[in-house]
Amino acid sequence: MRAENFVTRLPCQTICLMLSASPSVEHVVGATAAGLSRYGSLASTLRGHILSGEWAPGSAIPAETQLAKSCGVALGTMRQAIAVLVSEGLLERVHGRGTFVSNGIGGPSLLRFFRFRAASPDAAATTAVDEVPQSRIVSKRVIIAPPEVVIALDLPPGRRVLALTRVRSLSAQPCLYERIWLPLPLFDALVPLNKSAWDDLLYPMLQRLAGVTVHKAEDNVTFCLAATDVAEALHLQRGAPCARVARIAFDMAGRRVELRHSFGDALSFHYTAQLR
Amino acid sequence: MRAENFVTRLPCQTICLMLSASPSVEHVVGATAAGLSRYGSLASTLRGHILSGEWAPGSAIPAETQLAKSCGVALGTMRQAIAVLVSEGLLERVHGRGTFVSNGIGGPSLLRFFRFRAASPDAAATTAVDEVPQSRIVSKRVIIAPPEVVIALDLPPGRRVLALTRVRSLSAQPCLYERIWLPLPLFDALVPLNKSAWDDLLYPMLQRLAGVTVHKAEDNVTFCLAATDVAEALHLQRGAPCARVARIAFDMAGRRVELRHSFGDALSFHYTAQLR
DNA sequence: TAGTGGTCTAGACCACCTA
DNA sequence: AGGTGGTCTAGACCACTAG
């Protein structure tokens, strides 16, 4: 239970010493350094510390100078290793304060490209983005993963998932109907939760209760006609045009940790993306 | 020595001005004089060379060592400056060959997130992406920019634009109906072009005939009901559900150089985006 | 073989933040 | 004031690509 810095630094030092002491054998190592540059190996080592939870999300990692010294490399090399993880979004540097493990993406930041005209008559819509929608869990049950979920989350067949449906509202106006699938046993901790115990934002809950940090997501926008449950929840006619956003969320290790289908009234929906 | 630092800093700015050779780069000068880092100033200088056309898209820039020497800075500093432009997408480094000015984004790469189910029954759809749609210009005329275009392209009111409509087809099947607005006089060179003289891909034409490199774009996805012209072009019922992608394209200097509204059958449309 | 970018070092000093 | 990351130097050697 000792997550102290001194303890965590030892394996790094060991590996680094091994690499530098016998240059002729340095490519033999399988896991960390397989024909990699030195800063690449260091990046892998640091990544390991993050993924193992040794360095918790939000916490500061040791200073560059300290890391460089304990790994026996020049400062610039260690900075380069850190830069790799920064570009991956795993670390964040703050001038004068330190380098921190990323907290992942929050719920609101994922809504940033997902707006509703109804909430803001003008096209600017920047104000509406800041408003976090209220969420109400409609149903919650454990099921065997349906084929579509098995494929999207790359699960072994027969795996159980926690299936949620919820309605999200802006200014008490229902605007999104969501079906969410969370793989088990990863999210076992969420199964006993009462419907009313869920927060408005899911991802902070996943981090707090299951230790899973959502770090990346892929959205797929399509169009469909409202099924009965969608229509009822959004106060639409059955068969009304709907926008559907299918999202796959990834954790820091790149594992697929959530599939979500969000439905909204097609005519009051827009989605923005940057290319390049 | 502190004195040494001041001494070494002065000649750099002198040489940089000499390199830029055109005092008309006011956006550079303003930023340079302020408390910018040295590599930041160097980056601005390099950017000026690219935006002025002195370094043409696709061509190699001088070697790092040479640039560093002529600017009187250490190699590492020049590398940092180059890295800035690489991260902006203006430069691309190729190990062993050189550093090249970016050619911008091609037409196909902008279609990468814009796919049609009809063309590929299964969800993978990677094959269909490589297929470049055939384009047929339906109409072409010069008009005063409508209010929406004025806003989207940030034009002075009363400005003329070249307005195009075109139909794009995959395997002879019309799948996209596009309205395109190009600001004048920037694209005056395209005005006299015959309808049949247009290529399937617009952006390479913009570069070749008007010297404008499209470098970034922003897509906004919404849904609407087909107007008469859209419906006819796509062989749909009037009022049928349509996906609309409103795209604003930017050139290397960040100017808005195109507004485009692309319409497709909503039921055979999907759009993918990565978050973070 | 010559030229390019890529990696790495061992320092120095600067800018920023917190206490 | 003391710690953090940010900038910069002046070298060295390696890896890749070309003629």
Image (cartoon, coloured by chain):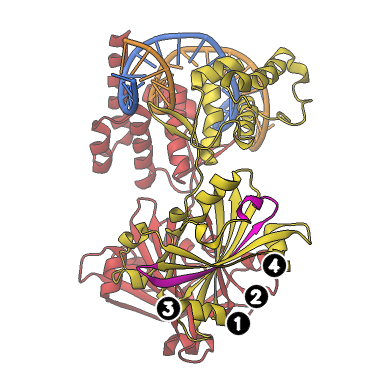
Chain colours: A yellow, B red, C blue, D orange
Q: What residue is pinned by disc 1?
A: B173
Q: Is residue A251 visible?
A: yes
The chain under label 3 reads A
Q: Is residue B166 left or right of residue B71?
A: right
Against A13, residue A203 (above or below) is below
Q: CA distance from mark 1 to mark 2?
A: 9 Å
In the image shown, does B232 or B182 lie closer to the viewer? B232
Q: Is residue B168 visible?
A: no
Q: CA distance from mark 1 to mark 3?
A: 26 Å
- The kind of secondary structure element at disc 2 is helix
Q: What residue is pinned by disc 3?
A: A267
Q: Are marks 1 and 2 in contact (CB under 8 Å)?
A: yes
Callout 2 amino acid: Ala
Question: Magenta region: which residues?
Answer: A170-191
Against A155, residue A210 (above or below) is above
- Residue drawn at (20%, 69%) of the image: B157
Kindly report which numbered mark, 4 or 2, lies closer to the viewer in this rendering.
4
